[in-house]
Image (spheres, rainbow, N blue to C red):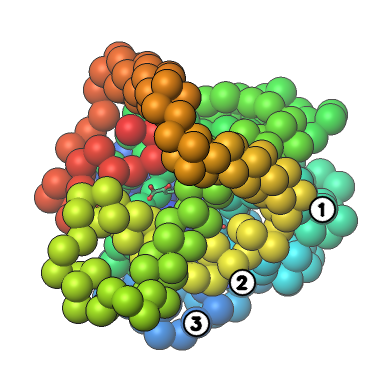
Amino acid sequence: MFEKIALVGIGLIGSSLARVIRREHLARHIAIATRSPSTLKRAEELGLGDSYSTDLREAVRDADLVIVSVPVGSSAEVAEEIAPALKNGAILTDVGSTKASVIAQMQPFVPKGVHFIPGHPLAGTEKSGPDAGFAELFENRWCIFTPLPGTDPAALEKLSEFWRRCGSNIDTMDAEHHDMVLAIVSHLPHIIAYNIVGTADDLESVAKGEVIKYAASGFRDFTRLAASDPTMWRDVCLHNKDAILEMLARFSEDLASLQRAIRWGDGEKLFDLFTRTRGIRRSIIEAGQETAAPDFGRHGVEQGKGIGE
Ligand SMILES: NC(=O)C1=CN([C@@H]2O[C@H](COP(=O)(O)OP(=O)(O)OC[C@H]3O[C@@H](n4cnc5c(N)ncnc54)[C@H](O)[C@@H]3O)[C@@H](O)[C@H]2O)C=CC1
Ligand SMILES: O=C(O)C(=O)Cc1ccc(O)cc1
């Protein structure tokens, strides 16, 4: 599909892309660039690309497609660095979990003649780094684009086809809407997980050993999310602040109402809520059956625990 693809950032997402690009023969040359020499060395040991550099400009030079897969807080720094070396007519995209902030950070540096199309694959795990990636990560997952006004339809179609060849389904929406939707379906669950595991860790009346020993499956599910990369999630919180705060405010109100129902013994209210939420779970399972979720077992990712399940 492309002569040269440059991957800037080679962690979970970048290395999964490298693997699927190779498997599906989507580029003649895969150039890998990242800031950290030790991560780059590991990518080279894994044989993820055809060329390796800590010089981001060298990697993106002559690339037809550049995919930035770094924590969202580093987007401006990366865009500023690579901008002078981007080829005229190249497609520049990203995979960041927040979109309005990434656009605000990158767009000012994008040269005229480069097609900047922000993207977000809704596929991931709690793991990070080049060893964590796998070629099947994007299969039967959504990839959301948040194109800017005036985006070239041919470039958008080419990038869509690329993601389809990686196994994904495509949706487009505006960046603000994306950030609001992701705040509730992805960002809040992670924040709640970090919080509940932190609360358990702070308890004086329950020993840490007991938390580990008796962790029921509900708590274990939270610990998986709460093991997600601290840099990535710090950046998501700081860069989708408004939408997350809005969702947290609603969440807190609903939690206070649940607290009241428990305090006053309002069993009917509890039962009604728990019945309604069970319906949501059933709808998700039904939707998932239509798109047959892949078995990630052999990659060490618990089946049914990734986003979109
Ligand atoms: N982990 C997940 O489940 C998902 C993550 N994302 C998004 O994908 C992006 C990457 O996440 P992961 O691959 O999980 O992270 P990761 O921590 O596994 O990898 C990040 C990579 O970026 C590099 N890097 C960091 N700062 C850099 C800089 N200033 N210049 C060049 N390279 C730099 C690191 O060396 C590393 O190679 C993030 O924006 C995240 O929000 C999107 C979907 C799922
Ligand atoms: O591991 C999980 O359950 C996830 O939720 C993965 C994930 C994390 C961040 C994203 O922007 C998209 C997917």
Sooner in the amino-acid sequence: mark 3 or mark 2: 3
CA distance for labels 1 and 3: 25 Å
Amino acid bearing label 1: Ala
Residue 104, disc: 1
Label 3: which secondary element: loop
Residue 36, disc: 3
Horizontally, is 92 left or right of 299 in the view?
A: right
Sooner in the amino-acid sequence: mark 2 or mark 1: 2
Residue 287 percent across, percent down from the top left: 36, 17
Q: Is mark 2 within 8 Å of ligand 1?
A: yes
Number of callouts in the render?
A: 3
Horizontally, is 309 left or right of 145 in the view?
A: left
Residue 59 percent across, percent down from the top left: 57, 67
CA distance for labels 3 and 2: 11 Å
Pointers 3 and 2 in contact (CB under 8 A)? Answer: no
Label 1: which secondary element: helix
Amino acid bearing label 2: Leu
Report the residue marked by disc 2.
Answer: 56
Pointers 1 and 3 in contact (CB under 8 A)? Answer: no
Q: Which one is nearer the viewer's eye here, 70 or 159?
A: 70
Marks 1 and 3: which is nearer the front?
1
The residue lying at 19 percent from left, 54 percent from top is: 216
Q: Is mark 3 within 8 Å of ligand 1?
A: yes
Pointers 2 and 1 in contact (CB under 8 A)? Answer: no
Residue 269, disc: none
Sooner in the amino-acid sequence: mark 1 or mark 3: 3
